[in-house]
Image (cartoon, rainbow, N blue to C red):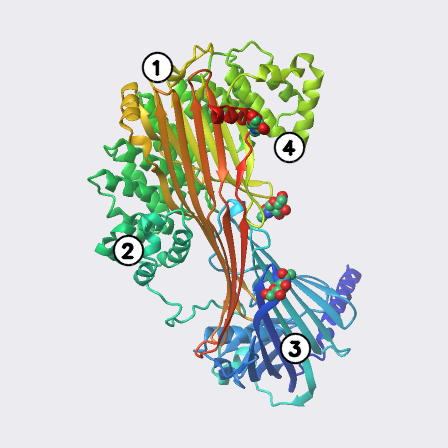
Amino acid sequence: MKLLLEVLLVISLFGYCHVAPAFGDAFQVGTEQTYNYLNEVRTGSASNASHTVGYNVRAQIHVATVWGDDEHKLLRLKINNPVLVTTPGDVSQRTTLSSVDSIPFYVYWNLGQVKKFYTSKNEDVTLNNFKKGVASLFQYQLLDGQYTEVDPSGTCDVQYTSHSSTRYHKSKRNCQFTGDRFERTEYPLRSLVKSSRSVDFTVSTEGSLEKVVAQDYLKYLVNAYDRFGAFVESITRLEIDSSSNKVDTVKGETVDDALKSFGVSEHTLQSEKYVPKCDTSNCETFVKLVKNFKTSLTNDRIGKQDSSSALLKLVQLGRATSTEEFLRVLKAKTMQDQKAQLLDLLGAVQTTASHEAAKNLLVYESDEDMFLAERYLQALAVGSRPNKAVIEDVLAMAENKPTDPRYYDTLVQTVASMGHRYAKLPGNSYDTDVVDKVQNYLIRQLNSCSKDKCKQRFIRGLHNLKSPKTLDALVKLALEGSSKVSVSAMKALRSFSVFLWNDDFRATFEDIFFQVSKKFDSSARALALDILLDIKPDFEELTHLVQLLKSNDKAYEVKQYLLQKLRMQADRCPDFAEMLQRIIQNDPKLNNYHVIGAKGLSTALTRTYSTVPSFNASLESLQEMSGGVLKRGVVDLALEVGEEKFSMFTLGLFAGGLSSFVSSGDSEDNEDDSESIAGMELSVQGSVLRPLIFFDGKGELMGHVWSGTASEPTPAYQATTLLQDNEEIFPLQNGGIVKLSTLGSISIDLNGQVTMSLWGRNAHSKVEQNTAIAVAGRLSLDTAFVSLAVDFDVRQEPQLHLTSDLDFSSDPVLCMQLMQPSSILNKKVVKAVSVPGTKYRKVQTTKVTHKVPGCTHALNQKNNDMCNLTAKS
Ligand SMILES: *[C@@H]1O[C@H](CO)[C@@H](O)[C@H](O)[C@H]1NC(C)=O
Ligand SMILES: *[C@@H]1O[C@H](CO)[C@@H](O)[C@H](O)[C@H]1NC(C)=O
Ligand SMILES: *[C@@H]1O[C@H](CO)[C@@H](O)[C@H](O)[C@H]1NC(C)=O
């Protein structure tokens, strides 16, 4: 036992001796050393690092050890003659940095750690941060291993690696820094921060610190575009200048005693946040800014660049604007034409203040007022920062059951979408109180519905909420509801993540697709098939699905839809194509499947909508026909980044009971019910809006067709909404705090025109989507002595035209054309360096313009043939 104790004592002494003497000669009490300090900061575009703006700070640092022993030391630091040089310009500026000249600050140093930092009170935050950057250079360890260190970057995991007895490397990771950070959950809309933080240092053989090189590198990229963003690099070099001098020491039992006479106070070594003072250039008021954008905010600018850009500019300031200011703008006589876009803005801002202001407009008397109220609610539904108080308020409004069914429906869809987005925020889930309330509300209302229309409204609500807890209820509706209810429930189910589908769900969808237990509506079957293919069937499952082609099922449009979906999937995925090929070759009856497939007009296809140098996006078109006319059509525009997809906009069309107008004595097992209905169902960023009904009931169809009201293009959807929304900070070793932000928006004007002649037995439709996309990102570093910023933005106005001609004078012939006119892609990077309080400001602007050529998408051979037919007639 005694021996063991002695051994332990020796070991611990050894350990002690090993650590302490290593620092032995560093900062000996009563001596002062001088170092040369140089910090170089440069920033530029992520795609071209050769042109940058930046600055250097040079200074001499005097480090005197005025108190302490081998382990505990009080260091007095002085920054002498700091000089700021900006690039470009190489102008040396006399700046507020001079105020730190020769003013001492103090560091309590303990075995390589900077335990405490002391400076005089009332010092400017950024100058203090600069000193913290200097102080943290004296923080180092000489034993390899993992440590936790606090420095201006926050609390970091630090790894030390020695290259020799005098050369060391330290890398810093996972720096925790308290600060606001916001990002969207959808990966394609996010931005990526790539960073590295490291320090190399050299000590003399006696153990004193000779040289330090600290490097911080940060690249900030917008996911949706290739190499689009900015970078910043900060390199700090500290090098010993002269041999040490003697200095006077102070007395004291403890560090605090020793410090008493210096009139300094303790601060954390972590940088503090800084809000730059307003000068006229960067401090606009909301009211003034709205006036600047007055023309961009009129409704005829929707779908144009200036409208999407205006939202980006206004939303940031809007988040800090009061209800009163909003109301001043909304109630201004001169702003009446801007009301609709201002409501888009209020929905995007999504604060309690903006909601209170918008509510002033939600009292309505006319249809026009109702559309404005809906416009606000639809903007709220897709907003990126759902707010609990606002959700509760919208829920209360829905619970009040407004009399206008359209407005009521929109309230339900808004509260459901907001519930979905709120559940996805960090720290929240579908168990979060307010989300649970929304879900209970929807289920309660659904259960009390007696009519299909009422049920459909709340099923759509569940579609928007997407709570996995409602899956069983939706499956039950899909299996047991009327055909309308069943189709709505299947639409909702299709919107859930494929990862939820276990074997039980798969069996249910197969039941619906193959009509095992009973007959199902053809749309419900098509949707069940969509899900079964989304799950990525294996060889056996696919073999099973393909059997439908051989069956004597009379619904040839369902077969055609299956065939089309198989082709579409095979085009997209070579593995799937190979598997399908094997299945077909193995089965002689299937081998001539194209014979079976010849009948039917349903189509399914995907096409590239946009690609580099712009964002990657695809168009998916699913058109399910019945008796020669469209029954369910979907055109989805999805942003694609890596494996991830984000639906930006979906145009859905539905119709029923129309085939009697077209019928050419076709023998399809027609489950169309007699009531004719047609309409449009849009979803914006995954949120389904209430349907827009073109007509409902035969009488109306007649009236509509004969009155010619549909002969002018009518807007079906107009709004500007946010896409990207990211804000974060990155504190540098040198004490500067880099701010990063990205905002993106999409402005959409969708208008359509349908003409139908029962006399000529033909119908024409034209749908035009005018879109403007703007993304603006910023990387900035603001201090009291210098400001750097890189602003990068991209703008484009892509358009999409879909026309269809249906001729039903004999066998129905449908010709569809999907056209994208050419567009211009503008990218701009603006780099600026300025010195606050002086006139110095240098700006470099790089603009790149790409012509994106237009195209007419080849749809499929059958369509081409039919277009040839209609062109001839
Ligand atoms: C970077 O930008 C400069 C000027 O802005 C240009 O001369 C140079 O070719 C660019 N380099 C690359 C790789 O694009
Ligand atoms: C877009 O697609 C191209 C080709 O597949 C790819 O090289 C590029 O990295 C993609 N861009 C983005 C931003 O995903
Ligand atoms: C349309 O018909 C013309 C001649 O009748 C033919 O040359 C052309 O290739 C056809 N186009 C398509 C897309 O089938």
Q: Residue at x 37, y 21 (%)?
A: 760
Answer above or below: position of 622 versus 647. above
Determine whether the residue tagged by mark 4 lies in a helix, strand or loop.
loop
Confirm or reject: label 2 Cβ below 8 Å from ligand 2: no
Answer above or below: position of 256 versus 302. below
Instruction: Using the rendered image of the protein, determine whether residue 232 is visible from the camera's viewpoint.
Output: no
Nearest to the eye among marks 3 and 2: give it: 2
Crowd around label 2: few <14 · some 14–19 · many ≥20 (10 Å): many
Please name the amino acid that badge 3 sits on.
Leu
Is 640 on the left-hand or right-hand side of 660? right
Residue bearing the label numbered 2: 326
Q: Using the numbered discs, state the Cα–Cα distance from disc 3 to disc 2 in whole angstroms.
A: 52 Å
- The reply to whether discs 3 and 1 touch (Cβ–Cβ < 8 Å) is no
Q: Which mark is residue 467?
A: none
Q: If the image is split into quadrants, where does the N terminus sit?
A: bottom right
Answer above or below: position of 68 versus 865. below
Q: Residue at x 25, y 44 (%)?
A: 362
Q: Which mark is residue 238?
A: 3
Dot 3 or dot 2, earlier in sequence: 3
Q: Using the numbered discs, state the Cα–Cα distance from disc 2 to disc 4 in whole angstroms.
A: 51 Å
Residue bearing the label numbered 4: 573
